[in-house]
C-alpha cells in the first residue's frame, strides 16, 4: 500500500516545495512506497498550488471563509484529506488553528514546522520576539501536533545564530533555508521508520 503524504499550505508553500523536491530527487516512491499525494490550501490564490500542479500533484482548495464555524471547516478539510488515505499529514505554513477533533483524527500522523526553538516562542512573531529578548540563537522545530498550540513531541530542530544587525526579516530568511533542509529530512525519516516497522 502506498504511504501517502498530504501537505496543507496557506501561501507560497516553500517548505512543501522542499518536501516535494526531496521526494522526487531521493526516490521516496521506489524506496518507501511513499509519495506526496495531494497539496491542499485554505486559500485559492496560494502560490504553492501552482508549484504542486507543475509537479503533477493533485491540489484542492477548502476555503475557510465558506464555513460558519471552525468545526465545519475542519470537517470539510478532513473529508478532502481522507480521500487520499494519508499516512502523514504535513502542515507547511498552514495558517489555521485546528480543532481538537481534527488533531485527534490524525493523532500520530500530523506534524508541523514552527519558526522557533520550541518550547521558546510558541505562537506568532517568533523572530522579532527572539530579537527583543536578546537571544544569541534562533531556529525552527518540527513537532507532532497536539491540541495545545505548538506543543507536542519535538522531532527535530535546526539552530541558527543571531547575527549583529539582524532584523526579523533577515533572521527569518536564514531560518527558512534551514527549514527547507530539515523538514524533508524529518518526513523521510518518518516514512523510513514506517517502512521498517511494516517489514518487521
Image (tube, grey):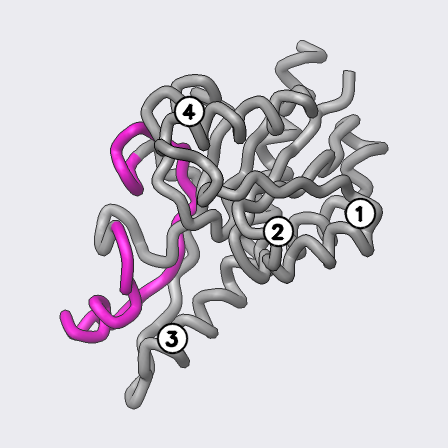
Quadrant including the N terminus: top right
Q: Give how far apart the Cα atoms at labels 4 and 2 are.
A: 21 Å
Return the residue at label 4: 102
Does the magenta portion include 100?
A: no
Return the residue at label 1: 24
**Residue 8 sits in which quadrant?**
top right
Residue drawn at x 43%, y 38% as measured from the top left: 155
Residue drawn at x 78%, y 51% as measured from the top left: 53
Where is residue 126? Give x, y as percent.
28, 62
Q: Give how far apart the Cα atoms at labels 1 and 3 are.
A: 29 Å
Identify the secondary structure beneath mark 3.
Answer: helix
Identify the secondary structure beneath mark 2.
Answer: helix
Closer to us: mark 1 or mark 4? 4
Residue drawn at x 37%, y 61% as measured from the top left: 139
Q: Give how far apart the Cα atoms at labels 1 and 4 are.
A: 29 Å
Indicate which disc, 4 or 3, sits on the residue closer to the N terminus: 4
Closer to us: mark 2 or mark 1? 2
Q: How dense is the environment of label 2, judged by Cα within 10 Å: few (below 14), some, or many (20 and up)?
A: many
Where is residue 156? Give x, y as percent.
44, 45
Residue 135 in view, yes or no: yes
Indicate which disc, 1 or 3, sits on the residue closer to the N terminus: 1
Where is residue 88? Give x, y as percent.
58, 29
Amino acid at each position: 500500500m502506498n504511504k501517502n503524504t498530504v501537505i496543507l499550505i496557506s501561501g507560497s508553500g516553500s517548505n512543501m516545495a522542499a518536501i516535494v523536491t526531496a521526494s522526487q530527487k531521493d526516490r521516496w516512491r521506489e524506496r518507501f512506497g511513499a509519495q506526496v499525494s495531494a497539496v491542499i490550501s485554505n486559500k485559492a490564490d496560494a502560490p504553492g498550488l501552482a508549484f504542486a500542479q507543475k509537479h503533477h500533484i493533485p491540489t484542492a482548495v477548502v476555503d475557510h471563509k465558506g464555513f460558519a464555524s471552525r468545526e465545519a471547516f475542519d470537517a470539510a478539510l478532513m473529508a478532502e484529506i481522507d480521500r487520499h488515505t494519508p499516512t502523514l499529514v504535513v502542515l507547511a505554513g498552514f495558517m489555521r488553528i485546528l480543532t481538537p477533533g481534527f488533531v485527534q483524527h490524525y493523532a500520530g500522523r500530523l506534524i508541523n514546522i514552527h519558526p522557533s526553538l520550541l518550547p521558546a516562542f510558541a505562537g506568532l512573531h517568533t523572530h522579532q520576539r527572539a530579537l527583543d529578548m536578546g537571544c544569541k540563537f534562533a531556529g525552527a522545530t518540527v513537532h507532532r501536533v497536539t491540541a495545545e498550540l505548538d506543543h507536542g513531541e519535538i522531532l527535530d530542530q535546526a539552530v541558527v545564530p543571531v547575527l549583529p544587525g539582524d532584523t526579523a526579516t533577515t533572521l527569518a530568511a536564514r531560518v527558512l533555508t534551514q527549514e527547507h533542509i530539515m523538514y524533508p529530512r524529518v518526513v523521510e525519516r518518518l516514512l523510513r521508520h514506517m517502512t521498517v516497522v511494516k517489514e518487521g
